[in-house]
């Protein structure tokens, strides 16, 4: 079984996410032991951001901001959809921010909708989301 980064690369629909994780210097972290739960925006999700946003975030001078955004999509531990079904909760992200999860009617995470849940990796799980979740 592949780790979270290799699973995302192999899927082919997370090219922007993988590029952002690399630019943020988080590849080694997400290849680490974990376990991690990653809410992974698709390339389409990144495409919903205002024009130029991604390109701007990928600039070296914006690395800290990019790290903050990327870590807002990561939660410590392996949380499967069955673990939260029917619940509303707030979790702390790997970046120290709070993330609201509502699993009472489908699953919404910080305003994004989980479109594919429980993609298992050797060091955690990926839940595919339809929007980039920005920290407040």
Image: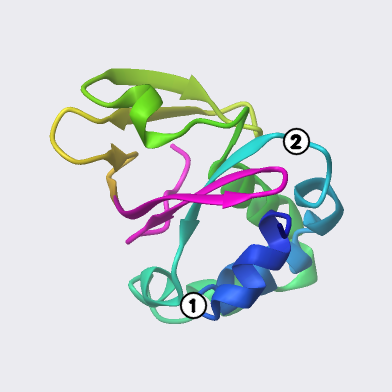
**Residue 125 belongs to magenta span:** yes
1 or 2: tag closer to the N-terminus: 1
**Residue 87 belongs to magenta span:** no
Element carrying mark 1: loop
**Picture quarter with the N terminus:** bottom right
Q: Residues within 10 Å of mark 1 (few under 14, many from 20)?
A: some
Residue ID for mark 2? 34
130 w.r.t. 31: above or below: below
Residue 43 is drawn in which quadrant?
A: bottom left
- Count of numbered labels shown in the rendering: 2
Residue 41 point in image, percent of width and height = 45, 61
Residue 67 point in image, percent of width and height = 69, 50
> On residue 13, which mark appears?
1
Residue 56 point in image, percent of width and height = 60, 74
Image-based side of 60 in relation to 88, left or right: right
Residue 15 point in image, percent of width and height = 58, 78
Asked whether 131 or 56 is in front, the reply is 131
Q: Which residues are magenta?
A: 114-136
């Amino acid at each position: 079984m592949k780790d979270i980064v290799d699973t995302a690369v192999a899927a082919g629909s997370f090219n922007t996410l993988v590029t952002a994780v690399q630019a943020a210097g988080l590849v080694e972290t997400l290849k680490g032991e974990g376990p991690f739960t990653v809410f992974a925006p698709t390339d389409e999700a990144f495409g919903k951001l205002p024009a130029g946003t991604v390109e701007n975030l990928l600039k070296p001078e914006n690395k800290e901001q990019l790290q903050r955004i990327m870590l807002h999509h990561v939660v410590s531990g392996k949380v499967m959809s069955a673990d939260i079904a029917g619940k509303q909760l707030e979790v702390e992200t790997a970046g120290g921010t709070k993330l609201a999860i509502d699993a009472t009617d489908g699953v919404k995470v910080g305003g994004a909708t989980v479109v594919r849940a429980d993609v298992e990796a050797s060091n955690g799980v990926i839940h595919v989301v339809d929007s980039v979740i920005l920290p407040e």
